[in-house]
């Protein structure tokens, strides 16, 4: 009996030793292959996790040469301007654009720089492209005064399936948080600008002082109130912010100040516009800050005004937590000459096309220069660049 027990003990010890060795090997293998994860993740989501995809682009600026290209008699067709990127835009649940120039109604006259009014037909063509989230608070919001701004706000309010923020037709409208629900996740959308152009007529600037509620402006007390309301109504808060210095890739002190403020308030994503050039992307606390995606459509004349950004990402809900995953940066080229105004993904753009560009035609190595510039500017390990 004792001999049997001794054999049993030896056998049991061997089995336990084998199991411990196997378990250690498995743990070692697991640790060598699984990468650390943060709130901004690259890991694949579970098939059952509620997910909302989003894409965002920069400033849609309807200069005179843009609307002349789109004009056909008494009508306008902007669809050809967006046809090369429509397939990227339309496949997302949320698609954001900054509508830089006012759309007040054709009765105000169609105008280009410096006091813009873009054709009403543009709204339908943006919808056709797939956009359903539009920011309207820009330095051009008061180009034609209070009545034109209010007219624009009312035009956008009439649109079905468009979440528009930044311009308001009443105090009540200003206090209403824009909310949309997709796949069981609720999103709030807020829009602000640093102000309006100094060149705006004095009478219009005075109107803004009298009726400050018509335009979303950078005011910390108001922003805090808006964010607190948004938290009560939604799972995710997205802010569009018109800020920074024009035609530079460097982040300004104002951008740094408000990026930190938005992060401290618990905003989830900040999408910057106004600089007309691409700028860095970073995470502050748990806030994704996209300082500038540059332009989207325009006929601006700087070489680096033609290089633009489009960013896509997923919001993934797991239990009570929502993470931002699969961030991808897709560079774009704003392409124009006397015959066409359109947009291309950089990955589809050739040096032959560049040779036909009004601004880039004398830049023989511009595509490679742009690629280097993008890598240096974005420079974020959590973001995949597709070019």
Image: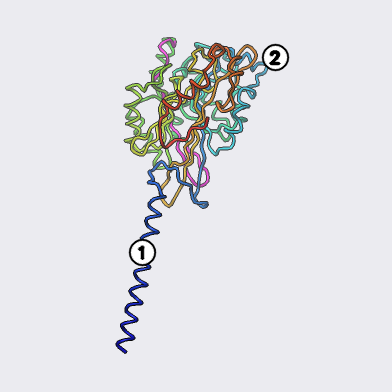
Label at residue 97: none
Magenta segment: does it hold 385? no
Q: Position of residue 114 (x, y in %)?
A: 49, 11
**91 relative position to 206: left or right:** right
> Along the line of sight, which residue is nearer the eye, 274 or 188?
274
Q: How is the image coloured?
A: rainbow
Instruction: Return the residue found at the far right.
Output: 73
Q: CA distance from mark 1 to mark 2?
A: 80 Å
Magenta segment: does it hold 190? yes
Frontmost of labels 1 and 2 is: 1
Q: Which residues are magenta?
A: 179-200
Which residue position is annotated with label 2?
73
> Along the line of sight, which residue is nearer the eye, 24 or 88?
24
Q: Tell me the SS state at disc 2.
A: loop
Quadrant of the snapshot with the N terminus: bottom left
Q: Identify whether 193 is placed above or below 263.
A: above
Q: Residue at x 36, y 64 (%)?
A: 21
Q: Residues within 10 Å of mark 1 (few under 14, many from 20)?
A: few
> Along the line of sight, which residue is nearer the eye, 154 or 367?
367
């Amino acid at each position: 009996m004792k001999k049997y027990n001794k054999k049993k003990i030896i056998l049991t010890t061997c089995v336990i030793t084998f199991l411990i060795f196997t378990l250690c090997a498995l743990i070692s293998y697991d640790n060598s292959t699984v990468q650390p994860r943060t709130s901004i993740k690259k890991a694949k989501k579970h098939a059952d996790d509620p997910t909302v995809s989003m894409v965002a682009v920069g400033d849609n600026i309807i200069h005179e040469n843009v609307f002349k290209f789109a004009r056909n008699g008494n009508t306008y067709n902007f669809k050809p301007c967006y046809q090369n990127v429509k397939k990227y835009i339309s496949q997302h649940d949320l698609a954001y654009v900054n509508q830089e120039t006012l759309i007040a109604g054709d009765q105000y006259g169609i105008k280009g720089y410096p006091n813009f009014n873009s054709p009403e037909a543009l709204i339908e063509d943006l919808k056709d492209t797939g956009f359903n989230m539009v920011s309207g608070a820009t330095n051009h919001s008061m180009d034609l005064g209070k009545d034109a701004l209010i007219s624009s706000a009312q035009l956008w309010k009439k649109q079905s399936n468009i979440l528009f923020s930044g311009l308001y037709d009443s105090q009540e409208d200003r206090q209403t948080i824009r909310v949309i629900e997709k796949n069981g996740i609720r999103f709030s959308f807020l829009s602000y600008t640093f102000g309006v152009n100094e060149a705006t007529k004095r009478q219009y600037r005075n109107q803004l002082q009298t009726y400050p509620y018509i335009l979303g402006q950078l005011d910390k007390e108001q922003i805090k109130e808006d964010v607190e309301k948004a938290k009560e109504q939604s799972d995710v808060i997205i802010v569009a912010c018109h800020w920074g210095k024009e035609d530079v890739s460097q982040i300004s002190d104002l951008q740094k100040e408000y990026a930190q403020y938005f992060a401290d308030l618990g905003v989830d994503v900040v999408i910057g516009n106004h600089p007309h050039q691409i700028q860095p992307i970073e995470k502050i606390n748990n806030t994704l800050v996209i300082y500038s995606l540059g332009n989207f459509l325009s006929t601006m004349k700087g070489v680096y005004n033609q290089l633009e950004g489009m960013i896509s990402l997923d919001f993934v809900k797991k239990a009570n937590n929502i993470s931002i995953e699969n961030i991808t940066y897709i560079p774009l080229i704003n392409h124009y000459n006397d015959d066409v105004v359109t947009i291309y993904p950089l990955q589809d753009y050739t040096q032959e096309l560049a040779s036909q560009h009004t601004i880039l035609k004398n830049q023989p190595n511009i595509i490679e220069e742009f690629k280097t510039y993008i890598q240096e500017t974005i420079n974020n390990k959590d973001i995949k660049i597709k070019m």
